[in-house]
Image (cartoon, helix red, strand yellow):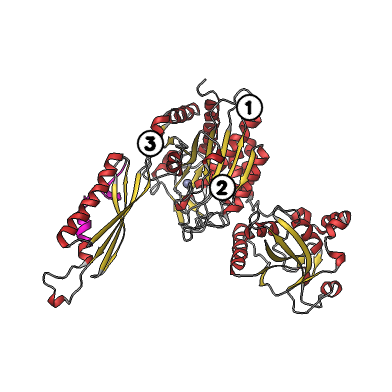
Amino acid sequence: MRTSYFAGGCFWCICGAIDGTPGVISVVSGYSGGDEADPVYEDVKAQKTGHRESIKVVYDESVISYGQLLDVFFDNIDPFDAEGQFIDRGRSYTTAVFFANEEEREAAERKIAGIEAETGKKVRVAVEPFKSFYEAEERHIDFHKKNPELYERELEESGRKKNSGGLRGGTETPEIVKFTEKKGKTMDAVKRFLEYVKIATQSDGSNDRTPSSEIQRDLGTKLADELIRIGAENVVCDEFCYVYGFFPATPGFENAPALGFISHMDTAPDFNGFNVNPRIVENYDGGDIKLGDSGRVLSPKNFPHLESKKGKTLIVTDGTSLLGGDDKAGAAEILTAVDELIKSGSPHGKICVAFTPDEEIGRGADKFDVERFGAKYAYTVDGGDVTEMEYETFNAAAAVFEVHGFNVHPGAAKDTMINASLVAMEIDSMLPPKETPRDTTGYEGFFHLCSMEGNVEKARLEYIVRDHSDEKFELRKALLKVIEAKINQKYGEGTAVLTVRDQYRNMEQVIRGEFHLVENALAAMRETGLEAKTQPVRGGTDGSRLSFMGLPCPNLGTGVYAMHGPYEHAVVEEMLASVEVIKKLIGKYSVFGK
Ligand SMILES: [Zn+2]
């Protein structure tokens, strides 16, 4: 059990709003933030004490985290008002988060930074160290329960009711509203997408928590809500911020294999992901697109694929952030496809949907619960070009050479000194020089020197090793061992110490046995009017990990390009095509094996 303190304006109202939240055990009205001992209601209300009307929340941390409680709190206040809340004016009605420790302070500041980035407006909620809390007079405690009618009226009149929950929707520029309204229902995937990209969800590889950043929950909760609204069952955004839900098979289709679709919620930490301002470029003329006032230009000179997008509708950034199409486009496409399919009344087998955190920092599959997900086969919807599907990834390992030298005075070093840095260079020179990322493409593998450091005493080389072919991958690792042995033969045992750690394997080994996943995807793409092809991934996907966890899982395209940076853009026509591909795949698997 944990206790936290907030000021959210009139304590009758905020008490009522937070009471009843799952995990919240009790909410008590009181006074906090001032120095005067034992304040009374009349003095606080008259601004005589320096206190704010406040609440003390006792909650079960195994059900609701401090971060989630902050979300509920902020959803029920107007965070931009510096002079009170709704009709209640004056300092005693201003808002505050009273933190008990650094962790709470940081969480509150992060939340505020997120809202400011999302809305472009200054948040006026004070973040102050907790000093003391004085319980309010008996008549104020549980006001909302004792006086339900008065409480309802207070809520209504104060304006709080209208406001609460309205924060997360973000603001949309009129241009975008016009675009999505003009096109009507067929633009649902785009509407969803534009909503999701407003919610910052960068993952953070600098810690080993899951989720690596609490802000991912903002989108997790929203996607879970949406699944419930569409009619999914057993929907949950779990402790690790993995969202699961499923749609039961329509009668008569219970024997069809359960088919899953997965996208990730986080965006890459490589570039700013806050305050995303998408812009729609209709009927793209094939030329340069200025990205806001950033000085950046999206040009076919740097992105030759743009030439083939002439006449299409693009969604671009203002050049100051990434777009977040990777992979919020996938989430928008999956939810829209399932929504439309359910509404159309088409029969289907069991459909499972999941959204995962932390894919961009390589941990998206770490806490994935394959059993809870419940699908027999699945697709990640996380690729680029919508005409390409992917089922071959690299086999991947990380290799480190530690080199131990022998240091003596250079003037008297003949035949004794072992310069670790020179030995490290010798090691690298024993690798095939033309097998680097720069020199390879398609199915060709490589050794990639990611980092080197050293002095005479010791040196360290870090590599990643990649190859599609299982056999060549093993040969690459064997070559590293040979080099280690040769160096030790020459300079003495223990000079070079090699450690090799496998990272992921080529999912083709699994998909080979379930090749219908490739054939059906290609067929669904062709039926949508796309020139379908497969493309080897020069990397890994969450699907490669999941495939070896028992869930065969190739990857579909989303229509998003130039991911992870300010040039990221989505092609609307391809997003809509992706929705069709997903619907057609569900159709195919509903009669699979019949
Ligand atoms: Zn992605």
Q: Position of residue 243 (x, y in %)?
A: 58, 45
Q: Residue at x 61, y 39 (%)?
A: 188
Magenta span: 424-441
Q: Residue at x 62, y 45 (%)?
A: 236
Magenta segment includes 430: yes
Q: Amino acid at mark 1?
A: Thr
Q: Quadrant of residue 579?
A: top right
Q: Is residue 22 left or right of residue 314?
A: right
Mark toward the start of the polypeptide (1 vs 2): 2
Residue hosting label 1:
250
Q: Is residue 113 left or right of residue 360?
A: right
Q: Position of residue 42 (x, y in %)?
A: 86, 73
Residue hosting label 2:
242
Residue hosting label 3:
508
* SS type, badge 2: loop
Mark toward the start of the polypeptide (2 vs 3): 2
